[in-house]
Image: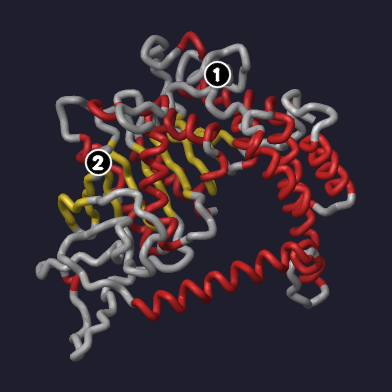
């Protein structure tokens, strides 16, 4: 057990109980016990390793059960879900809550639109009512109106107030929204609905003399990302990390709110509406945005479905001798370096991206003279760190031939990896 847990304490007994459950193959129960312990000891790496081990074992067990059911012509749920009474009780409780929420929604319906697009206020998050926007059209109103949203993005209101986002512009379905902490762009396709995923696109180094919105727009307006969103019903969000508010965003820093927390709040606006039982997003970042994405992955691995790092200049190395944000020492979530290895992660870099810039890219903490070498060394280091913690890393390196430091040149490869 971890060094923070006293040998004779009740928590130590809980840890031993989790070990016993794991040995018996009761991975779901073991995970529940370990997650309770982690809430008390969030920095304990031993608990993090045990959770990761349980996840891997549970996935392998359920995959084997599903495979056996397929071969026998039966579509059965995993054994852990069919036999564990606590899991069945939790599922029943969830079902009852969902039914109650639906009954409440039907009884109250949606509040009438005010003409403003309000996100996270208890009103429908997607009810723009400007006449020039075709998506704002609503059905003819009866004597006692119960307006139905014409926009398929308008569903059950979010569960809690996060902030009020004001719409600055809406061009071709791509909106610019402002919040008390900064701005971001979004694109919610007509195909979005319950279960839609969120894909966050993080831009590279900003220019203080230019509007940061234009830089973020280069990514979210790329035809390949829009095509992916339309085809899969995924929601695109692109935070605007301007110099004034988020000058240190590649290190997750911000003036009034951390850059990582800003992205989490943006994602939650959509996840709590479209995917309330799974708060994970897919994260993409290019160059300085790739540095942000790498550090987000090792501090918030539980918030990620997958992460794609496009040509970052430096990385948080899995070394306890190097200070954060370049290593584990004093990292806000040291256990995250272990759990990040479970998240599917790709490092994509062009083979011609060989310019050296050690000063600006934190070279004193890196291994390798350029982005290609640093990517290779970091992927190797993450794999070695995974092995030291009894894990199999899901981090991989993709080198794209004939491409230099170009987001446009790497985007196709990044999307192909995400959708394979």
Give the left or right position of residue 75, taking residue 151 as reference: right
Indicate the position of residue 416 as horizontal and vertical percent values.
Answer: 48, 50
Please identify the residue farthest to the left as the structure is shown: 132
Residue nearest the viewer, comparing 239 with 365: 239
Q: Secondary structure at mark 2?
A: loop
Residue nearest the viewer, comparing 8 with 79: 8
Q: Residues within 10 Å of mark 1 (few under 14, many from 20)?
A: few
Corner quadrant of residue 116:
bottom left
Q: Earlier in the sequence, mark 1 or mark 2?
A: 2
Give the left or right position of residue 338, taking residue 83 as reference: left
- Where, quadrant-wise, is the N terminus in this rendering? top right
Residue nearest the viewer, comparing 85 with 413: 85
Read off the residue under disc 1. 330
Residue found at x 43% / y 28% = 291
Figure disc tally = 2
Q: Residues within 10 Å of mark 2 (few under 14, many from 20)?
A: few
Whether residue 328 can be seen here: yes
- Classify 141 as above or below 224: below
Residue found at x 22% / y 45% = 178
Question: How far is disc 1 from disc 2 in space, using C-alphas?
Answer: 29 Å
Indicate the position of residue 382 as horizontal and vertical percent values.
Answer: 63, 28
Question: Could you say which disc has been placed on residue 180 in the image?
Answer: 2
Question: Could you say which disc has been placed on residue 36 in the image?
Answer: none
Residue found at x 20% / y 65% = 128
Please identify the residue farthest to the front as the structure is shown: 9
Corner quadrant of residue 227:
bottom left
Indicate the position of residue 12 as horizontal and vertical percent values.
Answer: 81, 34
Q: Secondary structure at mark 1?
A: loop
Please identify the residue farthest to the bottom as the structure is shown: 143
Residue found at x 32% / y 68% = 154
Which color scheme is applied?
A: secondary structure
Indicate the position of residue 117 as horizontal and vertical percent values.
Answer: 22, 60
């Amino acid at each position: 057990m971890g060094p923070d847990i006293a040998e004779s304490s009740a928590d130590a007994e809980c840890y031993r109980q989790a070990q016993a459950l794991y040995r018996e193959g009761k991975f779901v129960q073991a995970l529940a016990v370990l997650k309770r312990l982690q809430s008390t000891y969030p920095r304990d790496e031993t608990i993090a390793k045990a959770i990761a081990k349980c996840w891997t074992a549970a996935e392998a067990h359920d995959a084997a059960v599903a495979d056996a059911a397929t071969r026998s012509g039966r579509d059965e749920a995993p054994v852990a879900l069919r036999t564990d009474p606590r899991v069945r009780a939790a599922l029943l409780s969830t079902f009852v809550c969902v039914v109650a929420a639906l009954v409440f929604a039907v009884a109250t319906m949606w509040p009438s639109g005010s003409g403003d697009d309000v996100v996270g206020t208890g009103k429908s998050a997607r009810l723009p009512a400007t006449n020039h926007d075709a998506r704002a059209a609503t059905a003819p109103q009866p004597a006692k109106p119960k307006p139905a949203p014409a926009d398929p993005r308008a569903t059950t209101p979010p569960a809690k107030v996060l902030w009020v986002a004001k719409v600055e512009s809406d061009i071709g379905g791509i909106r610019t929204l402002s919040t008390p902490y900064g701005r971001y762009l979004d694109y919610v396709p007509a195909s979005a609905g319950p279960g839609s995923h969120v894909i966050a696109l993080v831009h590279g180094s900003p220019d203080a003399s230019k509007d940061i919105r234009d830089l973020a727009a280069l990514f979210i307006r790329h035809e390949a990302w829009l095509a992916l969103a339309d085809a899969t019903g995924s929601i695109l969000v692109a935070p605007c990390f301007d110099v004034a508010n988020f000058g240190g965003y590649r290190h997750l820093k911000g003036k009034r709110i951390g850059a990582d927390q800003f992205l989490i709040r943006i994602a939650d606006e959509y996840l709590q509406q479209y995917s309330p039982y799974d708060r994970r997003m897919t994260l993409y970042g290019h160059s300085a945005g790739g540095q942000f994405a790498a550090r987000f992955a090792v501090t918030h691995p539980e918030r990620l479905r997958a992460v794609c790092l496009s040509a970052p200049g430096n990385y948080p190395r899995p070394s306890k001798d190097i200070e954060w944000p370049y290593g584990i020492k004093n990292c806000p979530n040291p256990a995250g370096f272990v759990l990040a290895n479970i998240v599917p992660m790709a490092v994509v870099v062009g083979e011609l991206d060989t310019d050296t810039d050690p000063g600006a890219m934190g070279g004193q903490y890196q291994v390798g003279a350029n982005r290609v070498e640093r990517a290779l060394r970091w992927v190797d280091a993450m794999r070695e760190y995974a092995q030291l913690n009894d894990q199999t890393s899901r981090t991989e390196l993709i080198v794209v031939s004939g491409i230099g430091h170009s987001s446009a040149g790497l985007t196709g490869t990044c999307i192909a990896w995400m959708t394979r």
